[in-house]
Amino acid sequence: MKKIMSIITFVLMLTVFTAGGNMVHAETADTPAAHSDILVAYFSATGTTKGVAERIASVTGGDLYEILPAEPYTEEDLNYNDSSSRTTIEQNDKSVRPEIGSEEISLEDYTTIYLGFPIWWGEEPRILDTFAEKYSFEGITVIPFCTSGGSGIGRSGSNMETLAGSGTWLEGERFNGNVSEEDLQSWIDGLQ
């Protein structure tokens, strides 16, 4: 019996402590999970935007939400040199709305959303248009950010603002994939 109790105690300790030794608080009915009023929502086809989004979430303490396409993009789909690639066809037709495959998210408790995406053909990918039209941004400040090797954010923010029809949309910013947390913090501080 003592041996069983020792094993149970050990297993419980493993579930309470992470590998780094930080305490993990279990969620109970009396203690709801911590929730930020900042959301960092992003679409990332190759992982570059995801890395920047994760750094913004780290700096702001925001929650992360990945906008996943219902039909994932293949390497061939992303070939901008191919006029018949999926992304070229989507970007050339402003009415295309790729389906979002991520679970729906409630924006009700958020006051600020950082909205990230790569730049495709000088604009936001059409899946961001799907996201902008799908949700209400009433009472929310939306701050677009994009990743690109050289192209600016262009009209992407104003495009999505028009499609959304609600929220306060700030001018966005372009970052390269290796932007530091310090540079992101300076940008965020300059927004206020």
Image (tube, grey):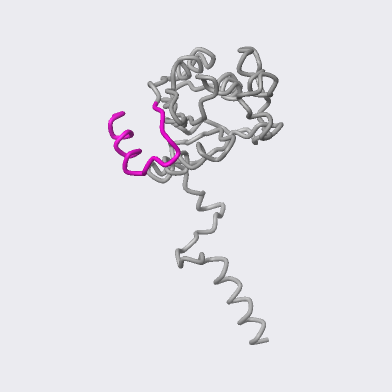
Foreground: 181 or 131?
181
Where are the magenta residues, as a range?
173-192
Q: Quadrant of the N terminus?
A: bottom right
Vertical position of residue 180 compared to residue 144: above or below? below
In the picture provided, is 192 more to the left or to the right than 143? left
Q: Is residue 109 magenta?
A: no
In the picture provided, is 122 more to the left or to the right than 11? left
Residue 167, horizontal then vertical, whole percent:
45, 19
The residue drawn where x is 58% and y is 71% is: 12
The residue drawn where x is 41% and y is 19% is: 168
Give the total of numbered labels.
0
In which quarter of the view is residue 169 placed? top left
Q: Is residue 182 magenta?
A: yes
The residue drawn where x is 58% and y is 76% is: 10
In which quarter of the view is residue 106 placed? top right
Vertical position of residue 48 compared to residue 126: above or below? below
Foreground: 79 or 113?
79
Residue 186, horizontal then vertical, whole percent:
29, 37
Residue 92, horizontal then vertical, whole percent:
62, 14
Q: Quadrant of the C terminus?
A: top left
What is the residue that sits farthest to the bottom in this orientation?
Answer: 2
Residue 3, horizontal then vertical, whole percent:
65, 86
Vertical position of residue 55 compared to residue 172: above or below? below
